[in-house]
Image: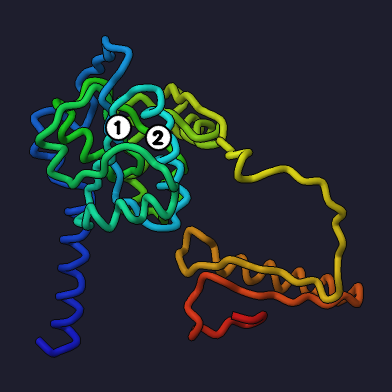
Amino acid sequence: MGLNDFLRAFRYKRKIDKFAKEIGNFYENEADIFCEKQIYPEDSRCSIAFVVPEISKFSGGHTGILRLGTYLCNMGHKVDYIAINDKSVEDMEKNASANFPGWKGRVLGRDALQKNYYDVGIATKWNTCYHLIANQKRFGLKAYFIQDFEPLFYPMSDHYILSLNTYKMGLKMISLGPWNAKMINKFLPDKDVKFIEFPVELGLYTIEKREIKVSEPIRLAVYIKRDPKRAPFLLIEQLKYLKWQMGKQNKRVEINFFGIEKNIKLPLGNN
């Protein structure tokens, strides 16, 4: 075996290990990969656990979960955020404060899934559903807070199949906005998916009437990421088309990219 073959095998082994860790040992659960039963809380004040991959800084999804958890704390519920990845609790608490100052609840490590009991467990990403199901005997009501239709994040693959399968697990599904619910019912018409509307902090994001003026050149700030689910190549082609159309009207367009590594040279604009 040559060096390249060794490195290729080593990298693939790491991918296998990462994948196994991502979904957890759900097959060790005595039940099938399905919610055995739902037990509704009897007390009006509950212990609630959000099962999260981790809490990352500048993550809109994690900020939404912290906002919801804080709202539940203010209603008198006890809220924990259980992270399944091996991240420092201290670092995640700092990230939570950066994302949502004044957040409430506790951040706990993965071992809390096997130590604590909760009235309600809420999965928040497709792979956290597998961890929730594997430890379902420690939760009364099992739910799934769906912020994205995650199968569309992947090509046809292991991740696509596993993420689509989470909608068949028997969890109480709550979608952020109606679109995810419509997509789930498109694939699985018999599934009941509730939804809540998108929240907005009107105290933070005020509505101001202003006159819109288009200057010359037209300056665009474009957020781009290499992640395929962000469709970076399609975004670039759309910007090429926009610049071409504006050029036909003798209008100049200045495109400024953010979010991608500075050493990547893009076919147009400033990175």
Q: In the rendered view, would you say 26 is above or below 7?
A: above
Report the side of 266 relative to 108 (left or right). right
Which residue is label 1 attached to?
A: 79
* Other-residue count near label 1 (Cα within 10 Å), few / some / many at <14 / 14–19 / ≥20: many
Contact, CB < 8 Å: mark 1 with mark 2?
yes
Report the side of 267 relative to 40 (left or right). right
Q: x%, y% of residue 222?
A: 63, 67
Residue shown at the point (13%, 32%) measured from the top left: 116
Residue extending farthest to the right is 249
Residue shown at the point (86%, 74%) measured from the top left: 216
Report the side of 75 relative to 35 (left or right). right
Q: x%, y% of residue 200?
A: 59, 38
Residue shown at the point (52%, 28%) measured from the top left: 196
Quadrant hosting residue 5 = bottom left
Q: x%, y% of residue 238?
A: 68, 67
Secondary structure of residue under mark 1: strand
Amino acid carrying label 2: it is Thr
Residue extending farthest to the bottom is 2
Q: Could you give the CA–CA distance between mark 1 and mark 2, rounded to whole angstroms?
A: 8 Å
> Is 174 in front, or is 170?
174
> Is 17 in front, or is 75?
75
Residue extending farthest to the front is 102
Amino acid carrying label 1: it is Val
Residue shown at the point (58%, 66%) measured from the top left: 223
Which residue is label 2 attached to?
A: 70
Secondary structure of residue under mark 2: helix
Q: Quadrant of the N terminus?
A: bottom left
> Is 30 in front, or is 106?
106
Q: In the rendered view, would you say 268 is above or below 29?
A: below
The mark found on residue 180 in the picture is none
Q: x%, y% of residue 102?
A: 42, 43
Is the image coloured rainbow, by chain, by secondary structure, or in one colour?
Answer: rainbow
